[in-house]
Amino acid sequence: MKGFIDDANYSVGLLDEGTNLGNVIDNYVYEHTLTGKNAFFVGDLGKIVKKHSQWQNIVAQIKPFYTVKCNSTPAVLEILAALGTGFACSSKTEMALVQELGVSPENIIYISPCKQVSQIKYAAKVGVNIMTCDNEVELKKIARNHPNAKVLLHIATEDNIGGEEGNMKFGTTLKNCRHLLECAKELDVQIIGVKFHVSSACKESQVYVHALSDARCVFDMAGEFGFTMNMLDIGGGFTGTEFQLEEKYKEDEPLFTSSLWGPSCDELDQIVENCLLPELNVGDWLIFDNMGADSFHEPSAFNDFQRPAIYYMMSYSDWYEMQDAGITSDTMMKNFFFVPSCIQLSQEDNFSTEA
């Protein structure tokens, strides 16, 4: 990873008042169509600034830890680091990536459910002490290889209260927590809190109520063993956005029941199972909103998979807000290069993105 950030140079287009992302997308669709280029992303970095500001205004007492695997593009990580966000890392590579941005080890949580010994030793070496654990074997690995570890017990949650099988992929049961606390005491491992994660697909509020109740029980149990608990990690499943295809059709245009698939040759690569679309032709463009999370893959020779181009944008008002907060490209975002973005499409050149 060394050099990945150092060599990066992100050009961010600054949008004048009256210019929106729709104009930007139209411009790039037109350009990519003329040149035969593939799909692309347009990233509004100003949204990150606004969401961080909103978080600070509403729940400042809760510290956000961004899950790096969600979107590890350097520009996103660097702006989050400049805003003072914490990071949840699942590997040595991710830990090194955010530390190259100047993130202190106290602002990193090592969240891998099954850690390699070499990576636990790396975390110890660079001072990343907070990590999660949900079983005795993992606890013993941590005890042997990281004497300063501060552990969050990862407890399982049920994503469905109505009796259906819950999400038990990761996390220990409430019943097993007492045993793990006993083991931690014997191994002299410091337990400092609890972690749980409820799937973002879960819509039942009682799931969160149960998870918080279980966490309270673990805190009480830990107190019996003399542990001082001071952290509750509520996971990344809380969501406020519905991801869907933006529907823009010509009036009176017939619609057809359709499904959308990605190009990976994977039978699970289904984007939308059932939707209504007009008749599409080769070369038509489909535009999706809110695709910044879990949409980036590593380049691969299979199917000649290359990461699509990313065009970063930000409004002047968001840029001024960042400067008012003391965040500038000269001090905290040294890899950013801000340039005025001139998006000018004549009425004749305006490329339709109706689909």
Image (spheres, rainbow, N blue to C red):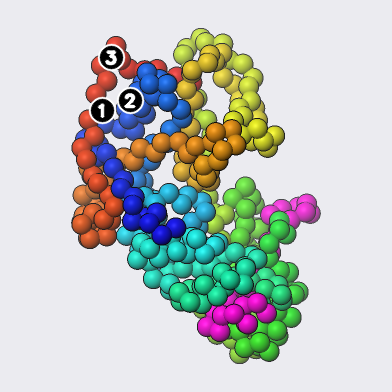
Task: From the image, tell me which residue sits under label 3.
Answer: 347
Q: Earlier in the sequence, mark 1 or mark 2?
A: 2
Q: Quadrant of residue 263?
A: top right
Where residue 127 sits: x, y (%)? 46, 76
Task: Reply yes or no: does residue 223 show up in magenta.
Answer: no
Which mark is on residue 197?
A: none
Mark 3 residue element:
loop
Task: From the image, tell me which residue sits under label 1.
Answer: 343
Where residue 309 sits: x, y (%)? 41, 36
Mark 2 residue element:
helix
The amino acid type, in three-letter code, at marker 2 is: Asn
Q: Quadrant of residue 219?
A: bottom right
The amino acid type, in three-letter code, at marker 3 is: Gln
Q: Against 211, is 17 above or below?
A: above
Q: CA distance from mark 1 to mark 3?
A: 13 Å
Task: Reply yes or no: does residue 149 show up in magenta.
Answer: yes
Q: CA distance from mark 1 to mark 2?
A: 7 Å
Task: From the image, tell me which residue sits under label 2.
Answer: 27
